[in-house]
Amino acid sequence: MITDKSDLPSHTAFIMDGNGRWAVKRGLPRKMGHREGAKTFRKIARHCKDIGIKYVTFYAFSTENWKRPKEEVDEIMRLFGEYLEEAEDFRKDKTRLIFLGDRSVFDEKLRGKMTELEQASSEFDEMTLMLAMNYGGRSEIVHAAKSAAEMISNKEIEVKDIDESLFSSLLYTGGAPDTDLLIRPGGEQRISNFLIWQSAYAEFYFTDTLWPDFTPKELDKALEEYASRNRRFGGV
Ligand code: IPE
Ligand code: IPE
Ligand code: MG
């Protein structure tokens, strides 16, 4: 367990990978893996809060995941809807909720619920939970570039005003610190279009554990490893 809070990452991000294989290994349909993964998501989010992590991001569905069979996509969307219904719990949790990604694909009811939850939780500052849904890192950067272009054409800023800090503020994560620690269970060692701007100097932690089997104990292990690393940010 990390006892010194200054050893904790400000922003930890998770690529929740391995749900499908978890189910297939058990002879179950892939969607059962997503159900189990959704439980792990709740458990891990709670643990992050308990140990005092301020910003946590979970990759739930990528802009590329639409390529999957309809039955699987439908189940992920159903689980997302279920989470939105119960997310009111953040009131007692004092957790701020933010959704990352292009939400124009979701129906009006879902979009309304997302905005409602974000607004209702906007004052909470104990922990910010960001859920990446129909999220792609490249699409996020293009979206931010378009926002900057619009600001120029509305004469709100000039080209010379665009710097890294302004650009970051236009990303879906605007206002959150850069990712310090990026955890990917599921055995793959790649970023899969997740937080590609924000992770420029992130520490990576890869594990073969499939996401539904990922535990608070393993998160503690990742945090210990993170605390032991020497981050140089290009310095000496
Ligand atoms: C969950 O894991 C990630 C999502 C895209 C929802 P996967 O469904 O990718 O699981 P594997 O990698 O096929 O095992
Ligand atoms: C990354 O997992 C996306 C999410 C966890 C939401 P994928 O399973 O889609 O990534 P690839 O296809 O292995 O790169
Ligand atoms: Mg996968």
Image (cartoon, helix red, strand yellow):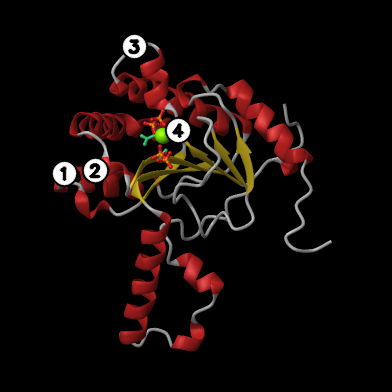
Residue at the spot x=37%, y=18% of the render? Answer: 23
Q: Disc 4, ligand 3: is the CB inside 8 Å? A: yes
Disc 1 marks a residue whose amino acid type is: Lys
Q: Nearer the viewer, mark 1 or mark 3?
A: 3
> Could you give the CA–CA distance between mark 1 and mark 3, rounded to whole angstroms?
35 Å
Disc 2 marks a residue whose amino acid type is: Lys
Residue at the spot x=31%, y=42% of the render? Answer: 65
Q: Does residue 104 appear in this view?
A: yes
> Could you give the CA–CA distance between mark 4 and mark 3, rounded to whole angstroms?
18 Å
Label number found at residue 109: 1
- Residue that carries the numbered disc 2 in the rendered image: 113
Label 4 SS = loop
Q: For the N terminus, which image quadrant? A: top right
> Could you give the CA–CA distance between mark 2 and mark 1, rounded to whole angstroms?
6 Å
> Could you give the CA–CA distance between mark 2 and mark 3, rounded to whole angstroms?
35 Å
Would residue 46 be found to the left or right of residue 39 on screen?
right
- The reply to whether dot 1 and dot 3 touch (C-beta < 8 Å) is no
- The reply to whether dot 2 and dot 1 touch (C-beta < 8 Å) is yes
Q: Nearer the viewer, residue 231 or 42?
A: 231
Percent x, y of residue 45: 49, 31
Q: Nearer the viewer, residue 58 or 210?
A: 210
* Mark positioned earlier in the residue sequence (1 or 4): 4
The 10 Å Cα crowd at callout 3, few under 14, some 14 to 19, many 20 or more, is: few
Label 2 SS = helix
Q: For the C terminus, which image quadrant? A: bottom right
Label number found at residue 17: 4
